[in-house]
Amino acid sequence: LKSSEVVLEMFEFLWNLFFTICGCIVGFIMTFFENWNSKPKTVAHHVIVITGTAQGIARELAFLFANLKAKVVMIDIDKELNEQTAMLINKTGGQAYAYGCDVSDPERLRVVANEIVNDPRLGCPDIVICSAGIWVVKQLDEASDIEIKRTIDINLLGYFWTIRAFYPYILERGSGHIVAISSLASYFGNSYASAYCASKFGVRGLMESLQWEIQERGLSESINILPILQINETAQAIVDGVLHEKLDVFVPSYARYICIYLKSLTSSSIHVQATVRDFLNIRYK
C-alpha cells in the first residue's frame, strides 16, 4: 500500500474507534439512568409459564408470581407433585395451572404450548421462564452415557425446546419476556460437574444469541441469565429482574465482577484462574 493509503486507513480506524468509545460511554450513561429510574412492571393477570415447578427455585417462583396476581402455568415431568403445588397455590387465592411434561420432549412441549395458548383462561404467555434442570455430581469418567445425555437433554436442549414451543406465539403477538435460569457454572467449569457446566455454558450462549436475534427483529431485549444461590433469595431476585426487565441479574450482586471482569482478567493464565477459584471457593463437589 502507498503511504497515503496507510495513513487513510489508520485515520479511518482511529475515527471508528473514537465513535465506538463514545457510543460505549453513551450506552453506559443510558443504562445507568434506565436502572436508576427503573420501576417494576405489573404482572397481575399476566400468563407466566415456568418449567420445573414441582420443586426448588421454580416452585418458589410459582408462589411468588401467584402472590403478584399472575396466572402461573406450571410445567414439570412429575405430574403428581406439580399438581399438588398448583393446588396449594389455588387454595391460597392464586391462579395456577399444572401440566405434566418432560421438557426434553419437543413434540410434547409443542402440544402443551398449543393447549395453553388456546385455553380461554390463559392464551399466549407474557413470560416464559426456563428452570427445569438436573445435576449429576460425578467426574467425567464416572458419569454414565445416559446421565450425561440426560443432563444435556434437560438442562440445555430442554431450554431450546421450551423457548421454541412458545416463541412463534410470542413473535406473532410482538411482545413477551423470556427468562433462563442458569448458574455460576455458566462462567466457571469445575470438577464433578462437567456435564452440568457444559449445559449451563450452553444456556448462556443460547440466551446471548437469542438476545441478538430478538433485537434484530425489533422486539424487547428482556433476556435474563440468572445464577443460582439460595432458593428464597434467588427466586426473589429473579422476580425483581423480571419486573424491572433487567438484561441480567447476579445473586449475590458481586458475582457479576467474579463472572465477567475477574474471569477476563485471569483468562491469560490457567494458574491464576485456579488460584482465584481456590480463593473464592468455587466448587460443585
Image (spheres, rainbow, N blue to C red):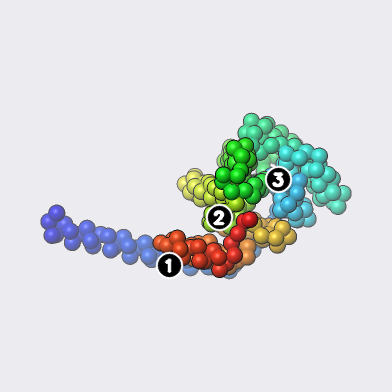
Residue depth check, mark 3 versus mark 1: number of the one nearer the observer: 3
Rendered residue at 18%/61% (across/down): 7
Amino acid at dot 1: Ile
The answer to whether the residue labelled 2 contacts the one labelled 3, judged by CB atoms less than 8 Å apart, is no
Rendered residue at 56%/68% (across/down): 279
Q: Distance between the residues labelled 1 and 2?
A: 35 Å
Residue at the front extreme? 142
Kindly identify which residue carries mark 2.
190
First-in-chain label (1 vs 2): 1
Q: How far apart are marks 2 and 3 (CA)?
A: 25 Å
**Residue 188 drawn above or below residue 48:** below
Kindly identify which residue carries mark 3.
52
Q: Residue 25 carries which label?
A: 1
Q: Quick check: 234 left or right of 67? A: left
Circle 3: is it few (<14), some (14-19), or many (20+) Cα within 10 Å? Answer: many
* Image location of residue 130, percent across then percent down: 64, 46
Residue 240 visible in image: no
Rendered residue at 57%/53% (across/down): 191
Amino acid at dot 3: Gly
Amino acid at dot 2: Asn
Residue at the left extreme? 2
Front position in the image: 103 or 1:
103
